[in-house]
Amino acid sequence: MRALRWVATVLCLSISSFAHAQNSPPLDSIAQRARPCTACHGEQGRATPEGYFPRIAGKPAGYLFNQLTGFRDGRRFFPEMTFLTERQRDDYLRALAEYFSAISLAYPAPVQTQASATALQRGRELVINGDPQRSIPACQSCHGDQLMGVLPATPALLGLSPDYLIAQLGGWQNGTRHALTPDCMATIIRELSSEDIHAVTAWLSAQEVPADAHPQAGFKTEPPARCGSIEATRE
Amino acid sequence: MKRRYLIVGIVALGLVVLGSWLVRSPDDDGYVEQSLDSGSASAELLERGRVLTRLANCHACHTVRGGEPFAGGRAIPTSFGTFYSPNITPDAETGIGRWTERDFWRALHLGYSRDGSLLYPVFPYPSFTKITQEDSRAIWEYLKTVKPVSHRSSPHTLESPYKYRALLRVWRALYFREGVFEPDATKSAAWNRGAYLAEGVAHCDLCHVARNDMGAAQSSPDARGGDVLEWYAPALNRPEEAGLRNWSAESIVDLLQNGRTTSEPAHQAATLGPMAEVVYESVQHAPRADIEAIATYLKALPEAASASSSRDRTPPRPATLAPILDRGRKVYEDRCATCHGDAGEGRPPATLALASNRSVTMDPAVNVIRVVLYGGYSPGTAGNPQPFGMPPFAQDLSDDQIADVMNFIRTSWRNDGALVTPDQVFRERTGPLW
């Protein structure tokens, strides 16, 4: 009888400690450390095009790392991001970049576009063919055939909100967003008019993301410009 | 009316004249000529200079984000206008390449620039005056070894009348007393080293002591902490703020060196905002013995008389607190409890306890409001390279919701903080983040 009671006690204790462990998963993880990120970028970095904050899940780690150091070192301007990154070391920012980069999640449907058919047509033309007369390369020539980015450091252009895309291209235009030198995007943006930017972002944000979307393994042909953001990852 | 201007003018002029008489000339700088070997400085002296330069945190103010070290240009917003830190690299044209060691000593010890003009006390010479000539030389020799950078800072943009440097004579006559730190023979060597570093080199007072309307540190031992860059730097001698008498020296060193401490359940803390910068840029790079000395000094600070209510801007508690706390509890259960625990007990090291945590209940409440709005990581240090962070809630919760949840936290689990209002939360949504 006493033995039975003893067994029951042990059983109860182990169940309760098991239950407790279930309620309180260990916090010493990179996921727990990334909670300040997911507050805005969505659980696991899955932010949808419904809002402003960009999705970070599945983006190339080199790209995410360059953005984190960019906020830290003043190349990008978004005070809330600078506040979170400004006193962190490269190794930690790289670990956070790799964590989000490795997350593979399905993409939601794009938001309904308000843009005119003419604007969408112009946007599609610039994305796929560029404008050789104005030395504007096609977006695809650097951002991948599927426009889902290229490893190691070129980001996807699909699956983002129109507001976010416009803010980024506008940021390059008015000098609040920079990439590492040589800043290839800055050179390209100088050739784009406001109408071009509107057209490109409208078309990009209206595209369905392919089911098997992921960054391309590497460039199939030599990209049209030298980009510091890519060269930095080779050092 | 005209007559009043005349009187004010005469008084001001009188003060300037009096000030000029009281302020010592730059030639009377107490500098002792040394028979120095004119060759290059020894490795030992340079290393000492490097450590002191870190502890004095020269780099933080004299470097812009992502910019060349010590090349200046960082904007320092104050109630008098915005100061731009000068270039202190050895560049001859735009830096301090033409300065002599004695010029540098005069800047540190007396607040004079090389051309004899007066420096604004945003450069903390009222603290640096305590630095010994040997240490001034070590810092000078070290700064001569950094990479020269050609960069001219923007001129300060100050309000009238502060843009008139001559008026600094009045300020100095009233508030500045030069003098190298004098050791107290009745105290231990560690205490003396800590006092020298904390009061002089590391100029803790610049932030942690309230300033008067003229920007001078209040001399009363009961002074509150200071307002700095939108944050509140708590008083280091008040048990309800950042007083450390009851802390173990181990925990103090842990906080200053690693940016957070969770080893003692009753004394968990993390640095955020300007103090995180001090840890990241300055203290973490200091030798452990120096940090221990500072801990010895801070632990021994005499306790201030209990807080006066004059600064207490919080409204009285309403008779019907219950509905506020009910709403606050719901927000807490929804957003906070997973990490901070049902009873605010925390889950260190990932999250700190909110129960019996003076950072949570402190007045003014500005720091904890900012932490809820903007989140934040403690600094990444050698001892804590992957710190945990608090998520931001500015994008997610309204001013009312934040005030409610803070009032729940500040009055639960034996916490006895004053209530905060949605207006207080709203005020922290504007202005720079650092």
Image: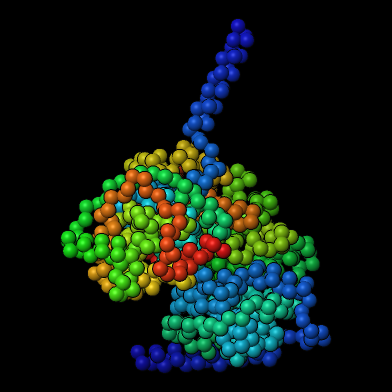
Residue B240 seen in the current view: no
- Determine if residue A118 is in view: yes
Which image quadrant: the N terminus of chain A?
A: top right
Q: Position of residue A111 (x, y in %)?
A: 25, 52
Front residue of A25/B429: it is: A25
Seen in the image, is B99 located left or right of residue B74? right
> In the rendered image, which quarter contains the C terminus of chain A?
bottom right
Residue B123 picture quarter: bottom right
User: Eyeballing the image, is B405 above or below B285?
Assistant: above
Q: Position of residue B305 (x, y in %)?
A: 58, 58
Q: Which quadrant would residue B173 be assigned to in this image?
A: bottom right
* Residue A146 vs residue A42, the one in the foreground: A146
Q: Residue furthest top?
A: A1
Measured along the vertical axis of the image, is residue B235 above or below residue A45?
A: below
The residue positioned 27% from the left and 47% from the top of the image is A109
Q: Nearer the viewer, residue A48 or A135?
A: A135
Q: Residue at x 28, y 50 (%)?
A: A208
| Residue at 66% across, 72% down | B53
* Residue situated furthest front in the rendering: A221
Numbered-mark total: 0
Which residue occupies the extreme left position in the image? Answer: A117
Q: How is the image coloured?
A: rainbow
Q: Between B18 and A220, which is closer to the camera in this rendering?
A: A220
Residue B194 x %, y %: 71, 64
Q: Residue at 62% of width from left, 9% of height from top?
A: A2
Q: Report whether B416 appears left or right of B421.
A: right
In the image, residue B326 lies at what x, y percent? 36, 40
